[in-house]
Amino acid sequence: MKWKELLVKYALEFFVIVLGISVSFWLNQRTTERANERERIKVLESLHAELTEIDRYCGERRDNYKDDINILDLLLEEELNLEDMGALTTSKGRVEFILTHYRVFEPPMNQYNSKVHSGGLKFIKSDRVNEKLGRLHNTYLKYMQTAVHFDQEFKQHFLPFLTAEHAELLLARHENGVGMEEYVRRLHEAIHGDDRFKANMHVLSDYLENKLYFLKLYDGLVLELDRALEDALGSRP
């Protein structure tokens, strides 16, 4: 076999080997890209589904905050409107809850936290989605948690005042002979007969308004993230 024939033979063999490696690499790359794309869609869809739950949770919290504020406003008015109060609640416990307890803010975040720990967020290509995810689950969540913390601290100082100065109101909450209207009348009279009590109620109302304000900001970002996720899902191949 002449050297030229050997050269052609080896060149063809080398070409076949290189082509085989290139095709194999291309196929592996395509397989990886398809797997990554499937994972990207899976991550986006799970986050989008969880966002629906978050939106529902925010709606429930918003309604609760508004009712809490409206109940306090009625108690702070000079003339007590029992009809309006009855439209908001018929439970003594519901009224006392506002004075003695605080509402936590813990939106459903299992899917997001799972993606953080598993590294699933790396599959999200959209900078817009990543930016809004970070703002929602970090910055704005901390705003809400801080507002809740202030409410919690206030209740920790307010409850000893109630037990020391107005224990009869806490006892009336558990007395079967004291109906809702009578309970609210006693509470209203106590507030307007004690400037310290009334001042604390105004402070509490301000704290609740503050929580509602930050909830509106949080809720607005939920809507922005929803649009960003829908746009990212709409760009699927």
Image (cartoon, rainbow, N blue to C red):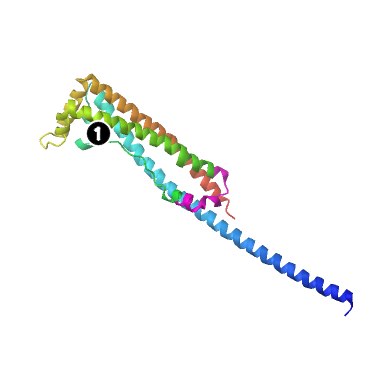
Q: In this rendering, is residue 54 above or below 83?
A: below
Q: In this rendering, is residue 78 above or below 140?
A: above
Quadrant of residue 90 in the image?
top left
Q: In this rendering, is residue 100 above or below 126?
A: above
- Give the farthest residue toward the left: 177
Where is residue 71 drawn, in percent x and y?
Answer: 27, 30
State yes or no: residue 117 in magenta: yes
Position of 173 with respect to 14 (left or right) is: left
Residue in the image at 21% along x and 23% along y: 191
Identify which amino acid the numbered label 1 is placed on.
Answer: Thr
The residue identified by callout 1 is 100
Where is residue 164 drawn, in percent x and y?
Answer: 18, 27
- Is residue 224 visible in the rendered image? The answer is no
Residue in the image at 17% along x and 32% along y: 170
Quadrant of residue 218 in the image?
top left
Residues 92 and 198: in front is: 198
Where is residue 195 drawn, in percent x and y?
Answer: 23, 19
Residue in the image at 16% along x and 29% along y: 167
Identify the image quadrant of the N terminus: bottom right
Residue in the image at 63% along x and 61% along y: 30
Q: In this rendering, is residue 195 above or below 117?
A: above
Identify the image quadrant of the C terminus: bottom right
State yes or no: residue 48 in magenta: no
- Is residue 210 visible in the rendered image? The answer is yes
Magenta stretch mostly in which secondary structure?
Answer: helix
How many numbered discs sit on the rendered protein?
1
Magenta residues span 114-129
Residues 182 and 37: in front is: 37
Residues 132 and 83: in front is: 132
Q: Residues within 10 Å of mark 1 (few under 14, many from 20)?
A: some
